[in-house]
Amino acid sequence: MAACGKKLINDPKDVVTQFIEGLVETYPGLQYLDGFPEVKVVLRSDVEVGTYDKVAVICGGGSGHEPAHGGFVGQGMLTAAVSGDVFTSPPVNSILAAIRAVTGPKGCLLVVTNYTGDRLNFGLAAEEAKSEGYKVEMVIVGDDCALPPTQGIAGRRGLAGTILVNKVAGAAAAAGLPLEEVAEQARHASKLVGTMGVALSVCTLPGQGTSDRLGPHQMELGLGIHGEPGAAVIELQPVDAVVTHVLKQILSPETQYVPITRGDRVILLTNGLGATPIMELMIATRKTVRELQLEHDIATDRVYTGSFMTSLDMQGFSISLMKSDTTILKCLDASTKAPCWPAGTDGDWQKPAKIAVPAPPSCAMKSDKMLQRSRELTKQGCILEASIEAGAKEIIRIKDSLNEWDSKVGDGDCGTTMYRGAIAILEDMKKCYPMNDVSETVNEIGATVRRVMGGTTGILYDILCKAAYASLKGTKTVEAKHWAHALQSSIGAISKYGGALEGYRTMLDALIPASKVLRERLEAGDDPLDAFIVSSEAALTGAESTRHMQAQAGRSSYIAADKLASAPDPGAMAAAAWYRAAALSLKNTSCHS
């Protein structure tokens, strides 16, 4: 990594909230929920809480792709957009806040890009919203045509084709169609679109260094919008040659990613990735339209050119093709006031820029007695406190190593995300963790990581804690066998909701060996302390073994095996690190009760 990239920003932690503030100042038809920094939601200013008489359409994801998705909020398109931190899925609470703020009796449609974190967070939010009485449907968009079909659970990535799906859904909702029909039209549109991107540079995250992955005369084909490596690195070529390659890939009869053949008609969206001049985008569009007509016998019904779904300051573009039909065209041509849709106009409402976050239907607050930390810790509470502190401090210590590994196999922020969670845990444990109640403390840890970590990592650790809490609840004196059962329950929950198994190159490749060894040693009658330490060694061995695994879940599943071999899975290494530190802390813990 080179020197820190130049950015016109203030504090890197504030880029998303300050972007939203600038967005609503620019477009009077938009507001945001007053829930910063956790709740980052842009919504239409003409929609009142609980009274909207049409289907609400909500999209969202990690920030860094502006104008997506906040710039497409407006009558005839999105009703609300939910933002996470840069390249980090929005937390469940933010998604729920958006649902509660704009959903009326007709329900809401969640349009979700196909990334594990987005699927998990939006999926859990949808289930919680349904339990509160809301009607919710979800459509997942995976339009990536760059990589061969995956063998794991990740599937095709969601790219700029999502913008067209959002427009179709928004128009269907504005026409007054019921939720089931709006969802069906969006689902239909998502099956008709394919996208592939190319780049001349890798994006630079706020506050981080610039990548030297691409040389001055190289370009990358099929890279992801989070900067993850693509299908191939090639020598720089003229844009006409690049367009020819991209169209062949999207329209390939072997992969059949899109149902587009000779004689069909399509919608074309040429999308800038953040640092590409409009001149270069128009040159690409020019070639694309001609290539479709002359080489593929495909006519274009509509052409949209601009920056719709970017990747921070990445220099490059993507091409999206959607098969045209009467319904699709009617929806795309329908009027909209979404400010960044090319046919949109600015709103003229004079309402306040922000409104309060709506409270849940029933907000049962925890009693002061539950949250108040006991003055005197029991022996069990003292051991628990020492273990939590040791695990968190170890994550803080290896932050840079985790980021370095993740930069080779993912988006480079695993260490930063885990560090954020560890710092918050150390702060919260002094204020509100009831250390003498093991299950409630584990539950509070889940609440902490859910609040501050976000993305796939945050939701998976929240799931881990919730499953462990359910296993430990009601046990007054927690012994080693109870911890073993709780760990096994957590692994089962993560596998159930995340889809990963042992050997998929995830955090489970550290936790599953640890769980097996811990149970075996305890059943054999070993001293519990020895069993924990030996199981932590198994966790480290399992994490290191991920170097030789082909990823089948998460963003690493899009990366070639030879590149994955350069680093272990950072999520597995993080899990092994805190588990090992917690186990070793048991040796030195003493408590006077």
Image (spheres, rainbow, N blue to C red):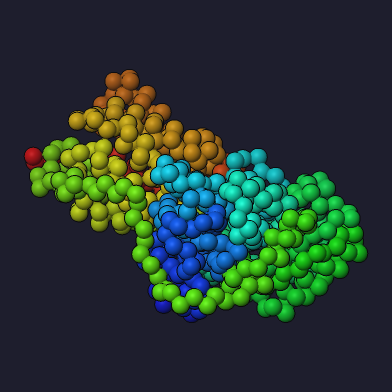
Query: Is 425 above or below relative to 518?
Result: below
Q: As drawn, is 156 to the left or to the right of 469?
A: right
The quadrant in which residue 591 appears is top left
Say which residue appears at 28% left-offset and 32% top-offset.
472
Query: 267 or 292: nearer the eye?
Result: 267
The quadrant in which residue 493 appears is top left
Say which residue appears at 59% left-offset and 71% top-offset.
337
Query: 385 or 293: nearer the eye?
Result: 293
Residue furthest top in the image: 524
* Residue 409 visible to an observer of this rendering: no
Q: Position of residue 423 (x, y in %)?
A: 31, 57
* Residue 436 visible to an observer of this rendering: yes
Say which residue appears at 67% left-offset and 78% top-offset.
277
Q: As drawn, is 489 to the left or to the right of 140?
A: left
Q: As drawn, is 139 to the left or to the right of 376?
A: right
Query: 476 or 161: nearer the eye?
Result: 161
Q: Position of residue 291 (x, y in %)?
A: 86, 65
